[in-house]
Structure formats: structure tokens, C-alpha cells
Image: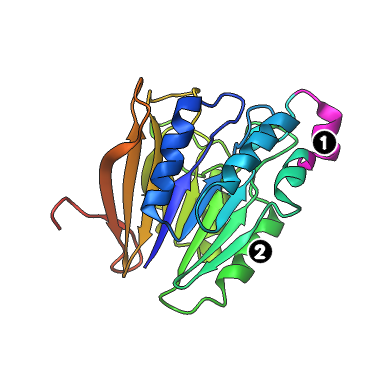
């Protein structure tokens, strides 16, 4: 069993400072096997924001896997965005934008979906699919294959269309690469589900862990437990005006054959 603490979109530069210490206390109390940050560490990819994000990441427990989001590239400085879109990210977090972490029962592979050409929307590159396939192919049966990417190829919780190039093709590519679970962010709305055309891939999105740029009115993170044949998602929420995270809903998914199913409470 592996426990992954999933957070996304902290947007340093728009962080609610009151939430930083309560979240770090929660993270250390939960003692996850891995912390995952699925992009948008900064608001405007500025040096000071990357510095604050790096200092925060350094305080998380255990190994940490981070991938960039669209906000981690310059928005208005077009020459830098096109020629060196991840220069600030590299200075803060090193040369790798698609890191990999291996846990006793899971292979977790980062995917960089940030697209310098259009900034906001994402794309899944052929090279990333190749890397995913190479990471997942050697994994023996029973080992979870988890992809981490900022943009998800499924609609958001409110029905907004997926903000990634060729969502159908991206879904198919993730399925062919062997992904079991995909962790993402970007929408600032927590969401979990699967697509009929890729029923073997479970998509888990969280909102924003720390930013004031809320869409649901609540900051959230999730503890994802990869168990024996099932995935459990425990959400942790910080409602408006509350400088603490408390337990939210728990969702459990199982995949008895080739397709994921959501378990009803009590099953």
C-alpha cells in the first residue's frame, strides 16, 4: 500500500499565508510515502515566487515529485516563453520537468503538459508518451502505474471542456502507455472520474491547496491510498475564513476487471 499526498496549484504569489503552516502540519501528520505537486507552483513564474515555492517544497515530508504548470512559464515575456519557458522552474527545481519516483508498489511518472505556444492550454507530447511507456512497461502485475500532469484530458467538475490539445487522443495515449491513475490540477476544482473511452484510467484532480484564486470557495488537498485492487481518496478541506484543514469526503474506486467503478458508501 502506498499513500500519496496530492496537492496542486499553490500559486506562490497569491498564497493565503494563513494556510501554509496548517497544511505543513497536516502533511507531516499524515506521513505520506510521497508528496505530489501537479503544477502551477507560481502565479507569474517570477524568481521570488519560485524561491518561495522551493522553500515550501523543502519543508514537505519524504520524497516530493513536482511538475510544471502553465503558470510556471512567463505569460507576457514572449521571447523567454518561447526560447526558455522553464528557465525559472529549472533554477528552482533542477533540470528535470518529468521526474520519476518508484515506491514499493507503484511507479509514479511526471509529465510536463505545459505548452509555451499557447500558455494556458496543455498538450501531451509524443516524447512524454514514450517516457511514460518506458516507465510503466517494466512494472510487474500488481504494481500501480501513476502519471502526474497539470492538465487533465477529461472535463472539469463543472463540465468545462478539457483544457488540453486533442483530449481524445491524450486519453488514448495514456491508456496505451499503461496508466492506472492520473493525478492533475489546473481547474481549481476537485474532481474524480473516468472516461468511457479509457475506462481503465482513473483521473483524480484536486483544486488549489493554498491560493486565494478559488473557484469552489474552498482550498483542498487529497490523500490518495493505492491499496490492494482499489484506490481511496481522502479529501482535506479548508473552507473560507478557516485557517485549518479538516477531513472531507472519502471516495473509493475499484477495478474488478478492465474498468473503474466507484464504490458506494459501506461497500
Q: Residue furthest left?
A: 266
176 part of magenta stretch = no
* Earlier sequence position, callout 2 versus callout 1: 1
Q: Can residue 112 be spotted in the picture?
A: yes
The residue where tag 1 is placed is 82
Q: Residue furthest top?
A: 241
Q: For this view, does 155 lie left or right of residue 44?
A: left
Task: Examine the rendered structure and indicate whether residue 131 appears above or below residue 84.
Answer: below
Tell me what residue is drawn at x 63 percent, y 28 percent. Answer: 43
Callout 1: SS: helix
The residue where tag 2 is placed is 131
Q: Quadrant of residue 248?
A: top left
Please name whichever residue, 53 or 231, is drawn nearer the observer in this view of the structure.
53
Mark 2 Cα within 10 Å, few/some/many (few <14, many 20+)? some
Q: For this view, does 75 lie left or right of residue 239?
A: right
Callout 2: SS: helix
Q: Quadrant of the N terminus?
A: bottom left
Q: Give the extent of the magenta segment.
A: 76-87
x, y percentage for residue 177?
56, 64
x, y percentage for residue 27?
43, 47
Q: Can residue 155 be spotted in the picture?
A: no
Tell me what residue is drawn at x 57 percent, y 77 percent. Answer: 138
81 part of magenta stretch = yes
Please name whichever residue, 57 or 221, is drawn nearer the observer in this view of the structure.
57
Render colour scheme: rainbow
Please name whichever residue, 52 or 126, is drawn nearer the observer in this view of the structure.
52
Q: Quadrant of the C terminus?
A: bottom left
x, y percentage for residue 235?
33, 43
x, y percentage for residue 214?
45, 24
Mark 1 Cα within 10 Å, few/some/many (few <14, many 20+)? some
Task: Examine the rendered structure and indicate whether residue 112 appears above or below residue 157.
Answer: below
Specify the label residue 193 is tagged with.
none
Amino acid at each position: 500500500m502506498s499513500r500519496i499526498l496530492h496537492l496542486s496549484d499553490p500559486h506562490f504569489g497569491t498564497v493565503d499565508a494563513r494556510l501554509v503552516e496548517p497544511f505543513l502540519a497536516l502533511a507531516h501528520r499524515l506521513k505520506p510515502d510521497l508528496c505530489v505537486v501537479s503544477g502551477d507552483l507560481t502565479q507569474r513564474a517570477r524568481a521570488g515566487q519560485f524561491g518561495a515555492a522551493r522553500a515550501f517544497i523543502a519543508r514537505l515530508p519524504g520524497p516530493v515529485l513536482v511538475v510544471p504548470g502553465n503558470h510556471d512559464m512567463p505569460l507576457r515575456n514572449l521571447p523567454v516563453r518561447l526560447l526558455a519557458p522553464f528557465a525559472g522552474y529549472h533554477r528552482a527545481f533542477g533540470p528535470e520537468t518529468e521526474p520519476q519516483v518508484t515506491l514499493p508498489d507503484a511507479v509514479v511518472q511526471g509529465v510536463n503538459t505545459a505548452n509555451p505556444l499557447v500558455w494556458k492550454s496543455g498538450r501531451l507530447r509524443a516524447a512524454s508518451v514514450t517516457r511514460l511507456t518506458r516507465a510503466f512497461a517494466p512494472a510487474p502485475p500488481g504494481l500501480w502505474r501513476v502519471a502526474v500532469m497539470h492538465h487533465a484530458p477529461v472535463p472539469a467538475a463543472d463540465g468545462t471542456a478539457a483544457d488540453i490539445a486533442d483530449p481524445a487522443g491524450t486519453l488514448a495515449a495514456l491508456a496505451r502507455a499503461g496508466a492506472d491513475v492520473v493525478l492533475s490540477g489546473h481547474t481549481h476544482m476537485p474532481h474524480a472520474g473516468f472516461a468511457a473511452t479509457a475506462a481503465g484510467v482513473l483521473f483524480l484532480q484536486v483544486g488549489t491547496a493554498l491560493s486565494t484564486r478559488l473557484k469552489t470557495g474552498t482550498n483542498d488537498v487529497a490523500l490518495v491510498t493505492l491499496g490492494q485492487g482499489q484506490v481511496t481518496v481522502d479529501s482535506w478541506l479548508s473552507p473560507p475564513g478557516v485557517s485549518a484543514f479538516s477531513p472531507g469526503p472519502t471516495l473509493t474506486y475499484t477495478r474488478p476487471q478492465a474498468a473503474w467503478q466507484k464504490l458506494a458508501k459501506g461497500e
